[in-house]
Amino acid sequence: MTNPTIRFIRRGQVVTLVNVPPTRTLLEVLREDLGSTGTKEGCGEGDCGACTVVLGEAVGGRIEYRAINACIRLAHSIDGLALWTAEDLASDPLIGPSAPKPSRANGAAGLHPVQEALVQCHGSQCGFCTPGFAMSLFGLYQNKAPGAPVTRDEAASALSGNLCRCTGYRPIVDAAVSMDRFPVQRVNEAELITKLEHLKTIPRWGSADFDPDSIYMTPNDLPQLLALRRQHPEAQIVAGCTDVGLWVTKQHRDFAKVLDVTRVAELRRVERYPHHIAIGAAVTLADAFDALVADRPQLQSFAHRFAGLPVRNSGTLGGNVANGSPIGDSMPLLIAMGANVVLMSQRHGKTRSRELPLEDLYTGYRQNVMAADEVLAWIKVPLPEPAEFLRVYKISKRFEDDISAVCLAISLHREDGRIGRVSIGAGGVAATPARARQTEAALIGQTSDSATFEAAAR
């Protein structure tokens, strides 16, 4: 077995790492291998945001910026991307105006507007969480138009994955809305895209473009993924690693082989059809919820409460569904909306697929019907109908960035004052995400009044 090289762009230069184990996290590589100790380890499970860094990827002629948790992100997954940590904001030659950056009065290097705003607004107390906050704000800064102001609501959303033990949120939000007051310093995207394109010409396996015996496999298309799954059914499939990463950091699990689906082009798309949308398994949670909210605006608040933004930026909807945690928040909602999953495999030289209701995917706690050579490829979500009434409720100890104690999603269709069709998905109540079929039966055909709902609740 071979160990692929990791290559990424940092401070305008190609960083090359060799012999990195498949389950080594990005945080471990930054702190222990590269000496970049500005990125902190707090919780080790993607909850506190102290380890937040920003990744950049060339998509459609521009750079997409995503703040992610380095503590649960596998290092190999950033191959071919750009990376920024808190140490890079004032030292990256690709960031800034065309003129040299000004120096501060004390002689130190000029700060990035994110850093300057945090200084001016006294946005740091003990300072441990500050690098993570700075990187979440950097992601927000880059995703806004140059010089555009940031609202307090936008700041709160961008910082939803960062915790401050000193309760210094007000000055941090003040800093967020003050970033536009300082001279604009943006990433030179044209130059970065050129460097990322050059990076693609540097092979990870000597002279070969791909090594099927690699310990960390990153297929680029669906046929390649299915072939590798057939050849290596024992490999651990990963997407954004927001759950598998916890197996590594908390359970100290190791995997001899890893199959990463996030580069599969076909599975990174959201496709729209006359009666449904198809969300590829490698679509991030952030993008998947954007697609769902576009059709059902009432889901906006629930989407915001799904973990924090760094988790939604890294994790995928397909990974959340395939993992099958009974407290995974997407499954009750998808069950209520009548979603199906498409499983695919390659057998005897032919591509095979089968489709089933999402609730039929699970057989037990984190167990499912998928064969060893199958992968979850698509989630098909019906488009809303005019008579649809859809609500989803989440009960958790914290409003944001927390798992559910209970998640309940209800979809009703009224016909002539009576309930015609109903679908109810529940999480946190059984070993698997569940469909409340008996409650549905108690509602169908009944009048839509309080007595009906009280009886159904019982």
Image (cartoon, rainbow, N blue to C red):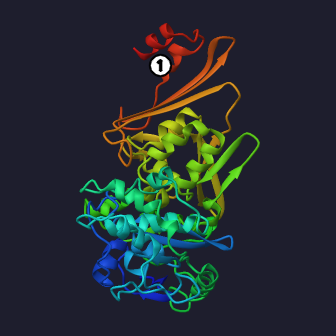
Amino acid tagged 1: Thr
The quarter of the picture where residue 89 lies is: bottom left
Q: Is residue 259 left or right of residue 22?
A: right
Q: Nearer the viewer, residue 135 or 1?
A: 135
Residue 81: x and y in percent read: 52, 77
Tell me if I can see residue 70 in this picture. Answer: no
The N terminus sits in image quarter: bottom left
Q: What's the residue at 64%, 81% (across, down)?
A: 190
Q: Secondary structure beneath disc 1? A: helix
Say which of 304 and 45 sits in front.
304
Using the image as rendered, state which of residue 364 and residue 450 is in the foreground: 450
Residue at 50% across, 56% down: 316
In the rendering, at what x and y percent does residue 125 appear?
A: 25, 64
Q: Residue furthest right?
A: 274
Q: Quadrant of the C terminus?
A: top left
Tell whether 316 sits left or right of 35: right
Q: Nearer the viewer, residue 87 or 314?
A: 87
Dot 1 corresponds to which residue?
439
Expressed as whole percent of the image width and height from the top left, the position of residue 422 reads: 57, 23
